Image (spheres, grey):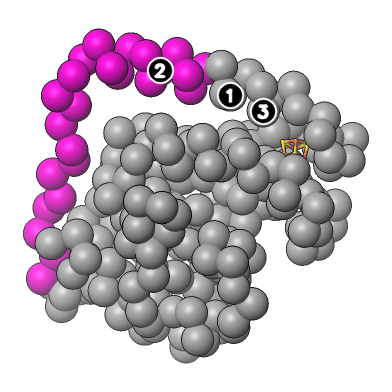
Amino acid sequence: MLDTNKILQLIGVQGYKLRANEHPEQLENTKGDWSELESEVKHCTKCSLHKSRTQTVFGCGNKDSDWLFIGEAPGKDEDLQGEPFVGRAGRLLNEIIFSIGLNREDIYIANILKCRPPNNRDPSSKEIHLCSSYLEQQIRMVSPKIIIAVGRIAAQNLLGSDLTMGKLRGTVHSYGSENIPLVVLYHPAYLLRSPSQKYKVWSDLQLARTVME
Ligand code: SF4
């Protein structure tokens, strides 16, 4: 595994300054929206995944961040802990985040689905459709300067595409009517199985950094 300090030196990472909140009164309103949305998700029974979940996995991190990472759905560890990207894949994602000069607490992380599909199967299009309004609200409230789509399911659904990861990565897309720049990364679980592909993630992160600069 590449040493993250070495990666930082190689790609010349400078520290990032998080966006300052210029209107504290808006922050209060935003917080209100967040707790309402989180409560709605917590009690959601819109699709059958509510029957098998241990708990919902809403999202975590800095709600005012410029960086929004979006993954697929909770796995076993996430379902147990109630937080996205924990376990081995989560630790690798932390290293990936660190390689761009950020910590996990500096970014916001959410998933396409808030409940775990049994046996980690792919989410169905119906489940994604029923859950989509929650993520759309999260994107609107974070209002990021860049979205990082982590893995195929996130990338294809955010971009409305059925192209392969090989074709989606390595370029800057745009999301939604606000044209938020979106960069696609291989999922850390895939990188654990195919470590030889890690260099592509470092390359895509540099692309994301370039967008932010
Ligand atoms: S996956 Fe989404 S739509 Fe389905 S029950 Fe969970 S929160 Fe509701």
Is the shortest distance between ligand 1 and the CB of mark 3 under 8 Å?
Answer: yes
Residue 15 lies, in percent from the top left, at 12, 53
Q: Which amino acid does label 3 sit on?
A: Val
Q: Name the residue under label 1.
A: 38
Q: Earlier in the sequence, mark 2 or mark 1?
A: 2
Q: How far apart are marks 2 and 1 (CA)?
A: 10 Å
Q: Earlier in the sequence, mark 2 or mark 3?
A: 2
On whether residue 128 falls in the magenta region, the answer is no
Q: Name the residue under label 3.
A: 41
Mark identifier at residue 31? 2
Residue 171 lies, in percent from the top left, at 36, 79
Q: How many labels does the image show?
A: 3
Q: Are marks 2 and 1 in contact (CB under 8 Å)?
A: no
Q: Are marks 1 and 3 in contact (CB under 8 Å)?
A: yes
Mark identifier at residue 68? none
Residue 158 lies, in percent from the top left, at 54, 60
Residue 187 lies, in percent from the top left, at 54, 68
Is the shortest distance between ligand 1 and the CB of mark 1 under 8 Å?
Answer: no
Highlighted magenta segment, given as a residue range: 12-35
Instruction: For label 3, count other residues whose C-alpha is less than 10 Å away and answer few (under 14), some (14-19) or many (20+).
Output: some
Is residue 22 visible in the rendered image? The answer is: yes
Residue that appears at 66% across and 52% down = 73
Q: In the rendered image of this protein, does residue 22 appear above or below residue 66?
A: above
Say which element carries label 2.
Answer: helix
- Using residue 167 as the reference point, say whether residue 126 is left or right of it: right
Q: Distance between the residues labelled 1 and 3?
A: 5 Å
Q: Which amino acid does label 1 sit on?
A: Glu
